[in-house]
Image (spheres, rainbow, N blue to C red):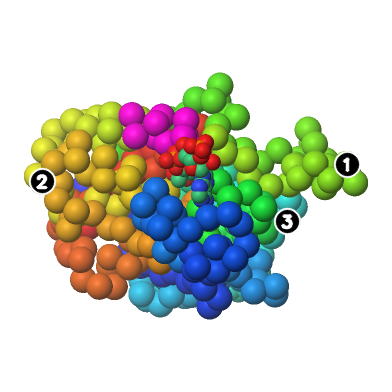
Amino acid sequence: MKLRSRITGTGSYAPKKVLTNYDLEKMVDTTDEWITERTGIKERRIASDSEAASDLAVQASKKALESAGIRPRKIDMIVTATVSGDMPVPSTASFVQSKLGARNAAAFDLNAACSGFLYGLAVADSFIKAGMFKTILLIGAEVLSRFTDWEDRSTCILFGDAAGAVIVEATEVDRGIMSTHLYSNGSMWDLLYLPGGGSKHPASKESIDNRVHYIKMKGNETFKVAVRTLEKLVVETLKANKMKPSDLSLLIPHQANLRIIQATAKRLKLPMDRVVVNLDKYGNTSAASIPMALDGAVRTGRLRKNDYVLLEAFGGGLTWASVLMKW
Ligand code: UT7
């Protein structure tokens, strides 16, 4: 029997503090109407001062472990997809490993921006198929609020803080990950980036004065490339599996903008009741958005055994990725 990988548990966590569009009206020159129409976002969550990415990640991971019925010691590897980790060194995954007591686990972070979780699923799938590991904890965790320019109305309305986690296990049953598709185009890096704090623009008084430690985005250009790229990606993914859009029970897209999600659904002729949307409540949480949405779908019974589900994402890098699974 062929070795496959399957998600056997999911969990998510969002900080308590809610920041609504009405709150943002008091901070920058914007309106609830503009944000709702252009993005679909109504509110987002903001981490407390004492919460870093690993704290969110641990909360989500505990729920994923519980739902999979697995003890931390059984985990072979922890991968955290994030662009807003606790520190540059060590990895956020290292903090998660320690806080969970997952003493047998390898640990590292992965940066593929908003596509990070799906890149992580491909990594987990590959390690399992290679026979190297059997049980992997994959997390998407972001505290983007710390890297958001709260004076820039074109970006500060978009992002939120959250974490989602899954347990990926080796299986011989005919369910689980069917295919993974990863792409990038680094020549378009300047559509979405965070220049400060790395080796190119290390922290200095000048870097702080120039506000380089915040996310920069050419929103409209990114939007257009995202729509075009994702429409092509979902069609290719189904074709690679000799499947039709009507075979899909659910589409779980990265939650960047409702209009991007609707365009992808339209390309597949999928009714919106087969598309998971939670950005109205959480905004764009980068690598956390897909595992959050997946956990929501599982816990509300929208995803059932043997359903075909397509996950897709697009983000900084540029990167884009998709995963097709039989649940
Ligand atoms: O997650 C990774 C991938 N990310 C994405 O895929 C995000 C892609 N981009 C987007 O979601 C959208 O481009 C945005 C929501 C960021 C912006 O929507 P848009 O329809 O592309 O607007 P725009 O940037 O073309 O701006 C239109 C107008 C501008 O005014 P003028 O130049 O027409 O006078 C902006 O200054 O809207 C103005 N504007 C705002 N007005 C009120 C920009 N931000 C705001 C705001 N409130 N918050």
Is residue 120 shown left or right of residue 234?
right
The percent coordinates of residue 10 (x first, y second) are 37, 67
Report whether residue 270 is seen: yes
* Residue tagged 3: 87
Q: Residue type at mark 1: give it.
A: Glu
* Residue 60 in view of the camera: no
Residue 224 belongs to magenta span: yes
Q: Relative to 14, does residue 82 appear above or below in the rendering?
A: above
Nearer the N terminus, badge 2 or badge 3?
Answer: 3
Rate crowding at label 2 as few (under 14), some (14 to 19) or many (20 or more) other CA atoms within 10 Å.
Answer: few
Q: Amino acid at mark 3?
A: Met
Q: Callout 2: helix, strand or loop?
A: helix
Drawn side of residue 149 relative to residue 39, left or right: right
Q: Image check: 265 left or right of 11? A: left
Instruction: Name the residue tied to disc 1.
Output: 206
Depth check: 116 or 124 in front?
116
Q: For the residue labelled by badge 1, is the local secondary structure a helix, a strand or a loop?
A: helix
Image quarter where the C terminus lies is bottom left
Q: CA–CA distance between discs 2 and 1? A: 54 Å
Question: Label 3: how many residues lie within 10 Å, few (<14), some (14-19) or many (20+)?
Answer: few
Q: Position of residue 221 (x, y in %)?
A: 47, 30
- Tell me which secondary structure the magenta stretch mostly adopts: helix
Q: Are there few (<14), some (14-19), or many (20+) residues within 10 Å of tag 1?
A: few
Image point 67% across, 53% down: which residue? 151
Q: Secondary structure at mark 3?
A: loop
| Amino acid beneath label 2 | Asp
Magenta stretch in the rendered image:
219-228
| Residue at numbered disc 2 | 247
Q: Quadrant of residue 143?
A: bottom right
Q: Are marks 2 and 1 in contact (CB under 8 Å)?
A: no
